[in-house]
Amino acid sequence: MDSAWRKTSPQDNPLLRQMRDQVAEAEQRLARAQAAGDARRIKEAEQALASKKQFLALAEQAN
């Protein structure tokens, strides 16, 4: 399974695609929180986005 995951291109890898979708959703959540001016939600959204971006970067490097 691991070798099959590594053989796919970054564009075709379903795990990476899913992770990119999650980053995009987190970016949208942050934008909504900023538009609402809710400092608590902004902070939470920023932390979630940073975490998702970090995991995506690690997964892209591993691929």
Image (spheres, grey):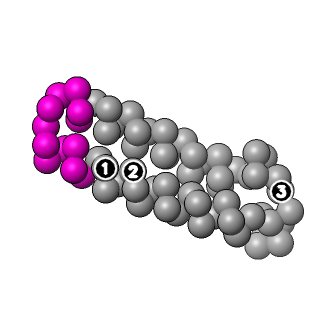
Verify whether residue 19 appears in magenta. Answer: no
Q: What residue lies at 78% left-to-right and 71% top-to-bottom?
A: 1
Which label's residue is closer to the chain start, 3 or 1?
3
Q: Quadrant of the C terminus?
A: bottom right
Q: Nearer the viewer, mark 2 or mark 3?
A: 2
Q: Residue furthest bottom?
A: 2
Question: Mark 1 near mark 2, Cβ–Cβ under 8 Å?
Answer: yes
Find disc 3 in the rendering and name its residue: 8
Query: Over which residues does the magenta segment extend?
Result: 33-44
Other residues around mark 2 within 10 Å, as few (<14) / some (14–19) / many (≥20): many
Residue 18, x across and y down, in percent: 59, 48
Kindly identify which residue carries mark 1.
Answer: 46
- Disc 3/disc 1 C-alpha distance (Å): 30 Å
Extreme top residue here? Answer: 35
| Dot 1 alpha-carbon crowd within 10 angstroms: few under 14, some 14 to 19, many 20 or more | some
Label 3 sits on a secondary structure element that is loop
Residue carrying label 2? 49
Which of the two residues, 7 or 46, is positioned nearer the viewer here? 46
